[in-house]
Amino acid sequence: MCDTPAFMIFEDSRPFYLCKNCGLIFTDCYLTLEEIKHHYQSQHTNSFDWNEKAKELLEVVSFAVTPRKIFDFGSGAGFLADAFRSMGLEVDNYEPMLHGVFRTGIYNNSYDLVILNEVIEHAEDVKKMFDNVYSLTRRGGIILISTLMTDKLINESDRFQEHFKNWWYKDDPTHISFFCQLTFEYLCEMKNSYSLQMLAAGPNGIILQRW
Ligand SMILES: [Zn+2]
């Protein structure tokens, strides 16, 4: 993401690298589109309570925003977007598997809340995805990113290898990028690209505000 040479920290079926500059852990071992499709089709997501999930996500950001317009970035089959719509909210969504390459310019700078619900760990090009997400968000708007963060693993550095080896999240073959708080701090520091501040960080993700 930051063009700093990274070094390999672990290898089993895939090699994983850590960037000491921004704290991103990633692998360059990507699945083909066919493999990704097959992977998603083997997962049954429609039995999940998406209405409950939508409520939960709104609750998480309620200290910062009461959104009217939401963008669901990486929306999968669209269950979460539909759940928000059923609550009377204005929602647009984008899913690369269905909609192809993201086209900027149509929806720019207009969303109160942009959600990446378990999406960013699938990103091959984090910076590019983030550029798109940022372009959607209005000034003062919120970006909610839910992903399992690596802080707990990294902070216990003498047992990092062991913890990482046993971390189930990295074993999903569609997961290729893993974040810690430092990675998002790094994004917030890219002042030529973004005006962002971090509002909250936890083990399950991060809340950013564009200003
Ligand atoms: Zn980096």
Image (cartoon, grey):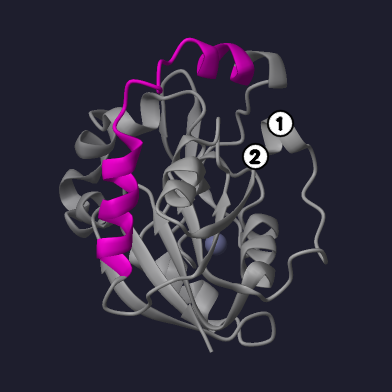
Quickly name the residue at label 2.
95
Residue, x 20% and y 53% (percent of image)? 152
Quarter of the image for the N terminus: give it: bottom right
Considering the whole magenta stretch, tell me its main secondary structure.
helix
Residue, x 73% and y 71% (percent of image)? 108
Determine whether, in the image, residue 177 is placed left or right of residue 45: right
| Residue 125 appears anywhere in the view | yes
Mark 2–mark 1 contact, CB under 8 Å?
A: yes
Residue, x 25% and y 53% (percent of image)? 56
Determine whether, in the image, residue 190 is placed left or right of residue 34: left
Residue 72 place in picture, x, y as percent? 54, 52
Quickly name the residue at label 1.
98
Q: Is 106 within the magenta?
A: no
Q: Quadrant of ligand 1?
A: bottom right
- Mark 1 residue crowding within 10 angstroms, few (<14) / some (14–19) / many (20+): few
SS label for mark 2: loop
Which label belongs to residue 66?
none
Task: Determine whether 118 is above or below 128 in the image.
Answer: above
Quarter occupied by residue 45: top left
Residue 65 place in picture, x, y as percent? 38, 77
Which residues are drawn in magenta? 36-61
Quarter occupied by residue 36: top right
Quarter of the image for the C terminus: give it: bottom right
SS label for mark 1: helix
Q: Which amino acid, by three-letter code, is at mark 1?
A: Leu
Q: Which sits in the foreground, 23 or 203?
A: 203
Q: Which sits in the foreground, 116 or 67?
A: 67
| Residue 150 appears anywhere in the view | no
